[in-house]
Image (cartoon, helix red, strand yellow):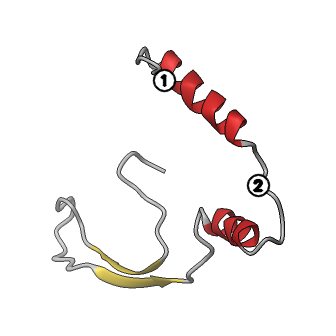
Amino acid sequence: MGGDEKVLRGDFEIAAARRTFSHPWRGQALTFPKGRGRYDGDFEDLAKVIRGEKALEFSPAHDLAVHETILRASGLPVE
């Protein structure tokens, strides 16, 4: 795919950004099947934790270490 193309789900319309041909094309409506979203599995997992069906995958100490590492790698202060 080129830099301007995106992967989309659901209904949307496309239209030519610039006219590169002589036909007066007005666009076309397209429908794509709705799939699972990128974070659906994460939210389903979180719901299991909230309902008490499973434990958190990572400890709070692990999460804190990850965030501190990202801040340090970004050159930001860790307080």
| 59 in relation to 61, above or below | below
Identify the secondary structure beneath mark 1: helix
Q: Residue at x 61, y 33 (%)?
A: 64
Question: Does the CB distance between marks 1 and 2 fall below 8 Å?
Answer: no
Query: Left or right of 12: which side holds 19?
Result: left
x and y percent of residue 48 in the render? 76, 71
Query: Left or right of 72: which side holds 65?
Result: right
Q: Residue at x 21, y 61 (%)?
A: 17
| 20 in relation to 76, above or below | below
**Pair 1/2: label in front:** 2
Q: Where is mark 2, residue-wise?
A: 56
Q: Nearer the viewer, residue 76 or 51?
A: 51
Q: Quadrant of residue 59?
A: top right
Q: Where is mark 1, residue-wise?
A: 71
What amino acid type is highlighted by mark number 1? Leu
x and y percent of residue 3 in the render? 39, 45
| 9 in relation to 56, above or below | below
Q: Residue at x 74, y 75 (%)?
A: 51
